[in-house]
Every structure is written in structure tokens, then in C-alpha cells.
Amino acid sequence: MSFMVIPAIDLRRGCCVRLIQGQSHQETIYSREPVKVAEGFAKAGAERLHVVDLDGAFSGRPGNLDVIRAVAAAVSVPVEVGGGIRDLETIEMVLDAGASYVILGTAACENPGLVAAACRRHPGRIIVGIDARDGLVAVRGWVESSGMDPLDLARRMVDLGVQEIIFTDIARDGMLTGPNTEALEKMTGAGAKVIASGGVAALEDIRAIAKLAGRGIIGVIVGKALYSGRFTLEAAIEAARSAADHAS
């Protein structure tokens, strides 16, 4: 069973950073050369990269398009990009910059018509990011609650043509507290492929998620644990492969 470990590259003012629970004042800069970070991940065996334009997420307009273009040009693996993508024009800009997939978050809640139009224009290339806090979907860089149930939103997105969903438990993001596998399993009920995000602290967390590979979970996004040296990407890929094989 195929299962991806997807390294995260969060961009802010051109640097590779990590935030705790998405809070702009809780920032750690890990590298001022995100292209080199991307090249390192690709060389280590990443099958896909997860790039988030944090400036875009907070402002609603892309803030790191040149960096995204440079990252996409530097690696041969697919790059998924999210953060502040809220109209068709921006979707086109990001895809033209070299992204293989575009992630819609806030737009999925507030403008389902955009999701439908984007899926028609770019089938299979639109991913919806569903970020939940206390069981409800959060929007606008995680600073507001939409009051929506994550599974209900996921089902709605699948009806519009979305094939992949990234599910993040915000309470665990950047906290190294382990993934919420119960919520993850629930999300597969929508019928989309699900990528897990948030809370991965150890290889055991990778294994726990990879064991769900046969149930519609196709990958896990890993950020802080890689940057803080808790394990290498190579070790994470091996742990995931072993667990997924045993689960199948």
C-alpha cells in the first residue's frame, strides 16, 4: 500500500519557518534558503512537498510566489501549495508557478462555487485543506471558527469534485503531541483520499497513521519534527513503508 511522508515548507517573508498552532507571533526561522531545504527533502526521498505561503494565509494574497516558483523548478517531485488562494486567478498563478496541486482552505468554506469551478478546470489538482479546532472548521489562517463540522464540509467538497483532503488538528500542530488518529479515520468517511497533518512527534506517530493506509489515508505531512531533528526524512519514509505494508 502506497503511503507518502510529505515534508512541509512553511514560507514567511521568503524564509522557511514553523509556527505553533498557526500563531504568527510563535515563529521559529529554520532556514533562509527554502530552495535548498526543498532540494534536501527531494534528495532524501520525498514523493511530494507541502508548501504553505503563510503571508498569503494571513493576507489573502500570495506573498512568496517567487520562492514557490524557485522551489518547483528545483525539484522533480510534485509540489502542493496552499495559503491565501481564494480565487481562480490566484489558482492559475500558483499552477503557472509550477505547483502540481493547489490547496484551498478558507475558500472551501466560504466559496464552494470556486471549488466547483476549480475542479472542473483542473480536475485532480485541487486539494481542500480542512483545519479543525475543538471539532469545528477554522478559517483565515486558523484565526476564525466557521462553526462547520469537518466531515460535513469534506462530504460537500467531494460532491464538488475534490479528490484529496488534508486534515489538520490545529490543537496538535507544531506541538509534537502525536496525531489525532480517531478524527483522521472519521474523515475518510467522506470518500476522499486523506492526508494527515499536525502533531507528528516520533516515528511511532508515522507508523500509527501509515497503518491506516488501507482505509483511505494516503500520507502524512511532517514539519517541526523534521526541523527539530527528532528523526530524519529517510527514517520516516522507512517507518511508513513498513507499517503500510503490514497493514495491507
Image (cartoon, rainbow, N blue to C red):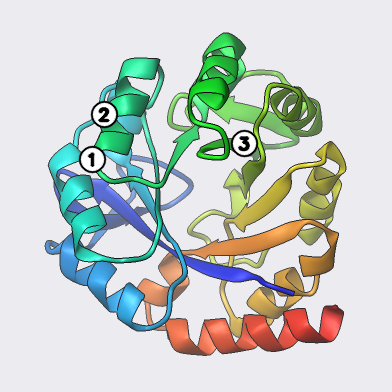
Kind of residue at badge 2 = Met
Q: Which mark is residue 209?
A: none
Quadrant assignment, res 45: bottom left
Label at residue 130: 3
Distance of label 2 from label 1 (alpha carbons): 6 Å
Image side of residue 194 versus residue 58, left or right: right
Q: Which disc is residue 93 wearing?
A: 2
Local packing at callout 1 (Cα closer than 10 Å; few below 14, some 14-19, many 20+) is some
Q: Residue at x 36, y 31 (%)?
A: 57
From the viewer's perspective, tell me whether residue 35 is left or right of residue 229: left
Residue under circle 1? 97
The correct choice, above or below, for 84 with respect to 80 in the image is above
Choose mark 3 or mark 2, whichever is in front.
Answer: 2
The quadrant in which the N terminus is found is bottom right
Q: Residue at x 78, y 60 (%)?
A: 181
| SS class, disc 1 | loop
Closest to the observer: 96 or 90?
Answer: 96
Identify the amino acid type marked 1. Answer: Ala
In front: label 3 or label 1: 1
| Amino acid carrying mark 3 in the image | Ile
Q: Residues within 10 Å of mark 2 (few under 14, many from 20)?
A: some
Instruction: Check contact, mark 2 vs mark 1: CB within 8 A.
Output: yes
Circle 3 SS class = strand
Labels 3 and 2 touching (C-beta < 8 A): no
Residue 20, above or below 133: below
Query: What x and y, as percent, mark residue 248?
Result: 85, 78
Please tell me which residue lies in front, 21 or 88. Answer: 88
What residue lies at 14% left-to-right and 48% top-to-bottom? 14
Residue 107 seen anywhere in this rendered image of the structure: yes
Q: Residue 212 at x, y = what percent?
A: 80, 67
Helix, strand or loop at disc 2?
helix
